C-alpha cells in the first residue's frame, strides 16, 4: 500500500498505510470506545494517549513492520509500536497524527540494556490540535514502570535511566509538547538529530531519504536478541520494590 504524501496539510495525515491499518475492525472499534464521550479533538487525543500509555511497555523485534492491529492484540509496545497504535487510533477518530523521528543519547536506557552504541533512534507522536502540531512521547512508558524508574533514579542519584528522564513529563494534556525521555532543563538529554516526520516506522525506515537507517539482517538479528533482554529487565524494574528511595536501605535494584 502506498503511503500518502508528506505535506504540512493536516488532512494529508489522516490516511491509511500498511502499518496504519485503519480498516482493522478491532482498531476502529477501540478508537470508538475510547473517544465515545469526547466532544473535541483535544479530548479525543488525550483519551487515546492515556489508553496507549496504560499498555505495558514492551520491546518488539521487527518494530518497523508491526501494524497497529497487531500492537493492539499484543497489548504492549515500545516507542515505535506504541507510536504506530497511537497514530492509528487518532486517525480512526479523524484527528490528524504522525510520528517524528529523532536520535537521542542512549543514556536514558541505563539499567535496561547495555549497548556499544551511544545513540538510539526514537519515535515521537505528533497530533494536530488547535491549529498546530503538538508532540508527546509520554505514552511510551506505562505508569508502573515510570513510577518505579523514578524511584530507582532518585535512589541512585541519576537523572536518566530505565527508559525515562527523571525530570521528563509523565502526562500530557494536549496543550503543549510533553517528552518523557528528555527535557530542555538538561541540554545533554536533548535530541542529537531530528530526521523529520513520517506516517509510521516502516514509512520512515524504508525511505530513500534515510538509506543509512535501513536495517540489515544482522542488525535485525541483534535486535531480536536484545528485545528479550529489554523485556526481562523492564519487567524487573516494573516489579521492583523501593522501600526508601531517598535513603540507602530497602531498595531492591535490578541487576544489570
Image: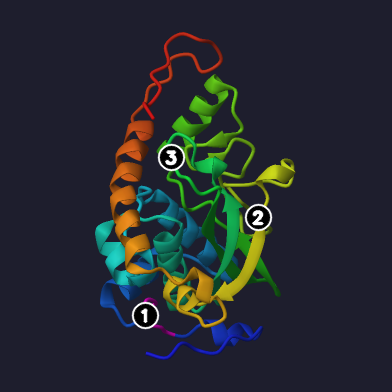
* First along the sequence among labels 3 and 1: 1
Q: Which mark is residue 22?
A: 1
Mark 3 lies on residue: 114
Q: Residues within 10 Å of mark 3 (few under 14, many from 20)?
A: some
Q: Quadrant of the C terminus?
A: top left
* First along the sequence among labels 1 and 2: 1
The residue sitting at 54% across, 55% down in the picture is: 137
Task: Give how far across and how far down residue 28 sits, in percent.
Answer: 34, 75
Q: Which mark is residue 48?
A: none
Does residue 161 appear left or right of residue 177 in this picture? left
Does residue 158 appear left or right of residue 145 in this picture? right
Quarter assignment of residue 17: bottom left
Q: Is residue 40 visible?
A: no
Mark 2 lies on residue: 191
Does residue 6 appear left or right of residue 90 in this picture? right
Task: Give how far across and how far down residue 181 sits, in percent.
Answer: 57, 47
The alpha-carbon separation of the residues under discs 2 and 3 comes to 20 Å
The residue sitting at 50% across, 69% down in the picture is: 213
User: Camera-side residue: 84 or 220?
Assistant: 220
- Look at the numbered disc 1 and give the secondary structure of its residue: loop
The alpha-carbon separation of the residues under discs 1 and 2 comes to 31 Å
Amino acid at each position: 500500500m502506498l503511503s500518502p504524501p508528506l505535506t504540512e496539510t493536516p488532512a494529508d495525515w489522516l490516511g491509511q498505510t500498511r502499518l496504519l491499518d485503519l480498516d482493522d475492525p478491532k482498531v476502529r472499534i477501540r478508537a470508538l470506545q475510547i473517544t465515545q464521550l469526547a466532544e473535541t479533538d483535544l479530548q479525543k487525543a488525550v483519551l487515546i494517549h492515556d489508553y496507549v500509555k496504560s499498555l505495558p511497555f514492551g520491546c518488539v523485534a521487527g518494530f518497523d513492520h508491526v501494524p497497529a492491529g497487531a500492537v493492539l492484540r499484543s497489548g504492549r509496545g515500545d516507542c515505535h509500536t506504541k507510536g504506530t497504535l497511537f497514530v492509528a487510533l487518532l486517525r480512526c477518530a479523524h484527528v490528524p497524527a504522525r510520528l517524528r523521528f529523532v536520535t537521542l543519547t542512549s543514556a536514558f536506557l541505563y539499567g535496561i540494556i547495555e549497548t556499544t552504541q551511544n545513540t538510539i533512534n526514537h519515535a515521537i507522536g505528533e497530533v494536530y490540535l488547535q491549529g498546530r502540531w503538538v508532540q508527546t512521547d509520554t505514552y511510551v512508558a506505562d505508569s508502573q514502570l515510570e513510577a518505579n524508574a523514578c524511584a530507582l533514579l532518585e535512589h541512585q542519584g541519576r537523572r536518566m535511566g530505565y527508559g525515562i528522564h527523571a525530570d521528563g513529563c509523565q502526562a500530557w494534556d494536549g496543550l503543549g509538547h510533553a517528552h518523557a525521555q528528555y527535557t530542555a532543563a538538561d541540554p545533554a538529554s536533548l535530541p542529537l538529530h531530528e530526521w523529520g516526520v513520517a506516517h509510521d516506522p516502516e514509512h520512515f525506515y524504508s525511505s530513500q531519504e534515510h538509506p543509512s537507517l535501513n536495517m540489515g539482517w544482522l542488525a535485525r538479528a541483534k535486535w531480536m536478541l536484545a528485545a528479550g533482554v529489554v523485556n526481562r529487565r523492564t519487567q524487573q524494574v516494573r516489579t521492583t520494590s523501593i522501600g526508601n528511595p531517598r535513603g540507602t536501605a530497602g531498595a531492591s535494584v535490578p541487576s544489570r
